[in-house]
Image (cartoon, helix red, strand yellow):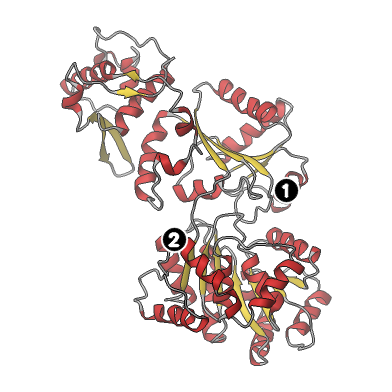
Amino acid sequence: MSACNSEEIITIYNENKDIEEDEIIAIDYELKQIENEMQKLEDHFSWSKDLKKALKDVFKIDKLRELQLPTMNAVMSNEDVILIMPTGGGKSLCYQLPAVISKGITIVVSPLLSLMEDQLYGLQKHNVKAKMLSAKCDKENVKIIMNALIDKKSDLKLIYVTPEYMAKSNRFMNKLQKAFEMKRLDRFAIDEVHCCSQWGHDFRPDYKFLGILKSMFPGVPILGLTATAPAKIIVDVQKMLDIQGCLVLRATFNRPNLYYEVRRKPTDKDTCLAMIENFLKNRFKDKSGIIYTTTIKDAEQLTTDLRALGLKVGCYHAMLEADYRSEVYSKWISGKYQAVVATIAFGLGIDKADVRFVIHHCISKSMENFYQESGRAGRDGKKSVSIVLYRLLDIFKLSTMVFQDKVEVWTRTDCAEMCDHCRKSKESKQVNIASYCRQLYQIMTKAVQSETRLTALKLIDAWYGKGATTLRVSSIPIPKFTRESGESVIGHLLVNGYLQEDFHFSAYSTISYLKRGPKAALALDNNHEILFNYELH
């Protein structure tokens, strides 16, 4: 890739606007290439020296992170941009730094008061003038902010506002119109921009109001920011904000400081509780973390159980009063709570850099959710851990998730032992489980004879001499290893093609049954080996 000047870069941005609106517009340079080129060009922009000086003098930062400089140069060039960057990757700086060196005002739209308060606190430490507008603001503060919008002598750089406030305050929108006419309106930064999309689980109706910004303030650039969003959500956001053809910059999903582990979830509730207790009292003693559950009931029960064991944890879910949720969040931020036990409601607005562990009591509902939730650990770049507790049935859910969300497919070499599977595989013994596979086939044959479909649970029950007697095979000895190990065997056979899922659909649900897989003929050969990298116990 040859070096080009600033005018050529801006031309590249503009040329993308001719592509059809249903496509996601992105510049397909390798991330390292685009970073290197933009670094070379930093002195070619009229604002480059001011940007570099403010970075060091105001924010006390020596070096920008991946995609920060390209994003800043694009928005300073009055281009519309959607930036998809991991939690803790430095999205906020992409509009805060340009705001500091610009003459006008940057309007930051954010969904949560707590998030805005955290950012204002951080900006105040750097002596950057910023204010917040919400329904909770007193009249005097509102008056000061409104006047600053149209005061050319004002040193106010950023105004944080909720989408609800924008949608309901005619006074604010009128002031914005005047600021626009005075050329005081530099840009809009829309945080958690995926909330615009009705496809997303975080959809906020008042975000739809932001669709008028382009028609009301033509030429004022929009910077949309999110930690992660699937392709269809990005397309939806572009349409809603009327920025089809905008530049889309997507950082890598890799978080090199995060270590991933998968643990079998004990079937016994007390054993599972003891496992989590051990994590909090020993491995993660005096460290901050989050425990995610699937249901409100699980969050409340687990909180109660952990508190009974002397652990300082708080409960957080959508059905709790807003003041109570704020109190839990504050106690966690201040260190009074070691962990928060929460549903996915504990998501937007979390701003705590030293989260050292995230435990999933059950697997997430999607890969997007898992990435967001696990990514709340280690925002300061230090080593942190994501632990998933799973059971056999989760395997079927996981395989579907991975199939649907193949964004970045990694090999073992790419992983570099950042997950427990790759770290332990060198140490594990290889066990031949072909004979167990043939035993399971015998059970399947008997099920066919009795016209019974086998779910994973029915299969393992029959293997361990439980469940319906019509499915048991008397010649098959009950395995000497634990049921958890048996589940791992079935999971290994499934993902390697010796078993396969057979989906049946009813009016109310989709049921997954198991049958012989495409490699069944190999498994039936007594000389064939199926090697498994874990010791059965």
427 or 459, nearer to the observer: 427
Question: On screen, 160 above or below 521?
Answer: below
Question: On screen, 45 above or below 450?
Answer: below
Quadrant where the C terminus sits is top left
Task: Give the residue at the far bottom of this rendering.
Answer: 181
Disc number for residue 324: 1
Question: On screen, 67 above or below 244?
Answer: above
Please tell me in which quadrant of the rendered image residue 107 appears.
bottom right
**Residue 81 position within the rendered picture, expressed as x and y whole percent measured from the top left:** 51, 72
Q: Residues within 10 Å of mark 1 (few under 14, many from 20)?
A: few
Please report whichever mark, 1 or 2, sits nearer to the chain's N-terminal start: 2
Q: Is residue 504 left or right of residue 381?
A: left
The disc labelled 1 sits on which kind of residue? Tyr
Question: Is residue 197 something that shows in the picture?
Answer: no
337 or 172, nearer to the observer: 337
Disc number for residue 199: 2
